[in-house]
Image (cartoon, rainbow, N blue to C red):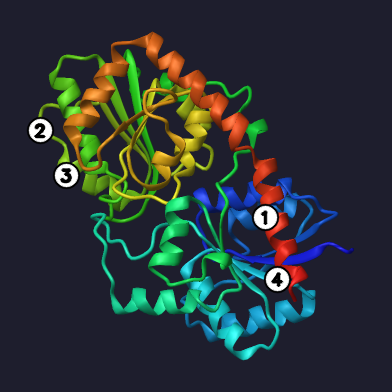
């Protein structure tokens, strides 16, 4: 049987968790079973990284979900490449895939949900007209992959999909990239990152003032409580753009945070060395599909604190490989940080257990195999 030809579409110009997920998937798939192709903006990092893997790449920019010129280009790519499956990864791409599905006979469409459905930035369930239309579009997909069980439930309960057409596949980690990572000594030495006795980090790709979802207000509140307790600690926010950093800075208490206790750093394409330099990594999101940065931190053996929501609670076992706290509870978050800051042995134990769990259950090879099996089942029904 020849390999199944899958054309992935990624409209993102930035390189975040979803794009690293795709690079990891592409680099671990069995090329005897799946021929991977990518349509993406030519200037994007994912385009360059995929080309470096020796895979087929095609320039495609999408300005909106109803970008008819991009839709025409995508239709031509499907025909010219002879792709068996179109695989999309965000809403703009899904909108074009829906239109092509309506207009093109026999097209097979797979989409991956990387986040929860019908949630606002505060973590409140909302059902807007736009959200309802998107859910209706999803029903035309031949297969919906979800990056966590929570996201898979949304596909069934919110979008109304047949459970038989929904498959949960946890994001896999490139285990080779987690080995031999050295702490970011040069960043620490430069003074760009505080070098206090206990370093606490939050890693999240945040754009604009939409900082509530990732729990940045709770992070700042908890940090203030830890500093008031007299703990020699520093707090670093990594991955926010200028708008998000400005919004976070407005929340800082006057006189409490100093250059030695707080830093906000923009996006880092490779944040692993800085993760490794942290004693504690927190993920205080109000809701999540499955945060890749949390899994990377666990794989690097960091002690982690996460909120007991969605995909976070699926990978952290409270007290075994990390600590769980209620969402939107800065007091509980600060207490967890204080507990870990005062107990280095506990940090080591939890970090070692976290690394084992990632190695044993969340390797990229397993994720790639699960994708291959999903494609093969779908292809066999054509």
Q: Residues within 10 Å of mark 1 (few under 14, many from 20)?
A: some
Q: Look at the numbered disc 4 and give the secondary structure of its residue.
A: strand
Query: Would you say 302 lies left or right of 74 here?
Result: left
Circle on res. 254: 2
Q: What residue appears at the point 52 percent right and 62 percent down from the top-left corner?
A: 12
Give the image location of residue 329, x and y in percent. Answer: 19, 38
Which element carries disc 2, helix, strand or loop?
Answer: loop
| Distance from the alpha carbon under mark 3 to that under mark 4 | 47 Å
Dividing the image into 4 quarters, which one contains the N terminus?
Answer: bottom right
CA distance separating discs 2 and 3: 10 Å
Q: Which residue is mark 3?
A: 250
User: Does residue 260 appear in this view?
Assistant: no
Locate residue 265, reporting x and y percent.
37, 38
Task: Report which residue position mark 4 lands on.
Answer: 85
Residue 27 in view here: yes
Q: Earlier in the sequence, mark 4 or mark 2?
A: 4
Q: Earlier in the sequence, mark 4 or mark 1?
A: 4
Mark 3 vs 1, N-terminal side: 3
Q: Earlier in the sequence, mark 2 or mark 1?
A: 2
- Whole-angstrom CA distance, mark 4 to mark 1, is 12 Å
> Which residue is denoted by mark 1 in the rendering?
371
Specify the quadrant of the image occupied by residue 61.
Answer: bottom right
Residue sitting farthest toward the right: 1
Mark 2 crowdedness (10 Å alpha carbons): few <14, some 14-19, many ≥20: few
């Amino acid at each position: 049987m020849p390999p199944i030809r899958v054309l992935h579409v990624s409209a993102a110009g930035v390189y975040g968790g979803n794009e690293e997920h795709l690079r990891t998937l592409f680099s671990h798939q069995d090329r005897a079973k799946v021929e991977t192709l990518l349509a993406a903006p030519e200037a994007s990092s994912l385009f360059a990284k995929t080309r470096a893997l020796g895979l087929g790449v095609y320039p495609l920019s999408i300005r909106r979900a109803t970008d008819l010129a991009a839709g025409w280009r995508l239709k031509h790519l499907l025909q010219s490449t002879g792709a068996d499956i179109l695989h999309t990864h965000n809403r703009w791409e899904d909108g074009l895939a829906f239109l092509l599905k309506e207009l093109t006979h026999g097209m097979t469409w797979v989409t991956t949900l990387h986040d929860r459905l019908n949630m606002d930035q505060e973590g409140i369930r909302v059902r807007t007209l736009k959200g309802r239309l998107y859910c209706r579009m999803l029903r035309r997909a031949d297969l919906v992959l979800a990056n966590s069980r929570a996201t898979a439930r949304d596909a069934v309960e919110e979008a109304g999909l047949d459970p038989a057409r929904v498959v949960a596949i946890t994001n896999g980690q490139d285990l080779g990239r987690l080995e031999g990572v050295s702490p970011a000594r040069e960043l620490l030495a430069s003074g760009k990152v505080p070098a206090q006795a206990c370093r606490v980090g939050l890693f999240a790709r945040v754009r604009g003032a939409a900082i509530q979802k990732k729990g940045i207000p709770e992070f700042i509140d908890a940090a203030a409580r830890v500093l008031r307790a007299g703990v020699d600690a520093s707090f670093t926010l990594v991955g926010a753009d200028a708008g998000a950093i400005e919004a976070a800075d407005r929340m800082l208490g006057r006189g409490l945070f100093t250059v030695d206790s707080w830093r906000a750093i923009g996006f880092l394409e490779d944040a692993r060395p800085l993760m490794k330099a942290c004693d504690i990594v927190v993920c205080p999101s109000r809701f999540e599909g499955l945060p890749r940065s949390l899994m990377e931190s666990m794989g690097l053996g960091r002690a982690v604190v996460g909120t007991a929501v969605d995909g976070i609670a699926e990978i952290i076992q409270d007290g075994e490989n990390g600590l769980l706290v209620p969402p939107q509870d800065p007091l509980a978050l600060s207490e967890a940080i204080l507990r870990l800051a005062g107990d280095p042995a506990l940090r080591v134990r939890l970090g070692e257990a976290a690394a084992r769990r990632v190695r044993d259950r969340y390797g990229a090879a397993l994720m790639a195999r699960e994708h291959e099996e999903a494609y093969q089942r779908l292809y066999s029904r054509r």
